[in-house]
Image (tube, rainbow, N blue to C red):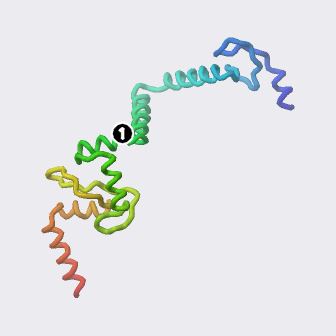
Amino acid sequence: MSPTSRTQQLPKQDCEGCKKPFQPLRRNIRFCKRKACAQARQKARWTKWRESLSFEEFRDFENSRQQGYRERTGYTRNWELQNKYGITLEFWLGYLDKIEHSCEICKKQAEVLCVDHDHATGRFRGALCRSCNRSIGQLGDTAEHLRRALSYLERVNSR
């Protein structure tokens, strides 16, 4: 059976969007192909989908959608940089360009660098890869612990 013969078998019906008669190509088609009707179809689908969700499911969906927007626009990152470290997103991006997106300790280029900061004061110190940032954190953010670790490595490697 060709598509045209199948189309001819279906009766004309009124579009739910514009109320004008149209010839559906398949069963269960309720809207014609006009642009305004396509928008009405999307709204009807959204309404049906929304009604099928519990409040918690819709809230979780909406929160993730808003979080995606904030991530795409950089809004969240700018807020975090200003409130945690006292720097702006523009300063951070300029700083990364200045150090050529490489860790200030190991000099490896990394796509994502961590903001190194003093945990006592919150003061910005620089940009480190995750490995170096964690290493400094594990050593308690003190030069004395770092000296002890260096001394230990020199001692055991010289054996």
Disc 1 residue type (three-letter)? Tyr
Q: Please name whichever residue, 135 or 79, is drawn nearer the observer in this view of the structure.
A: 79
Quadrant for the N terminus in the image: top right
Q: Position of residue 4 (x, y in %)?
A: 85, 27
Q: Quadrant for residue 62, please give it.
A: top left
How many numbered marks, from 0 up?
1
Eyeballing the image, is 139 above or below 120? Answer: below
Eyeballing the image, is 60 above or below 21? Answer: below
In the picture, measured across the screen, residue 104 lies left or right of residue 67, that is left
Residue at left 74%, top 13%?
Answer: 21
Q: Please name whichever residue, 17 or 34, is drawn nearer the observer in this view of the structure.
A: 34
In the picture, measured across the screen, residue 26 lies left or right of residue 39, that is right
Tell me the crowding category of disc 1: few under 14, some 14 to 19, or many 20 or more residues within 10 angstroms, Cα based: few
Residue at left 77%, top 15%?
Answer: 12
Residue at left 18%, top 53%?
Answer: 119
Residue at the disc numbered 1: 75
Judged from this view, the residue extending furthest toward the bottom is: 159
Q: Position of residue 137 (x, y in %)?
A: 22, 60
Judged from this view, the residue extending furthest toward the top is: 19
Q: Position of residue 106 (x, y in %)?
A: 31, 69
Quadrant for the C terminus in the image: bottom left
Eyeballing the image, is 126 above or below 39? Answer: below
Q: Position of residue 116 (x, y in %)?
A: 25, 56
Q: Could you tell me which secondary element the residue under label 1 belongs to?
A: helix
Q: Quadrant for residue 10, please give it.
A: top right
Q: Quadrant for residue 107, please give it.
A: bottom left
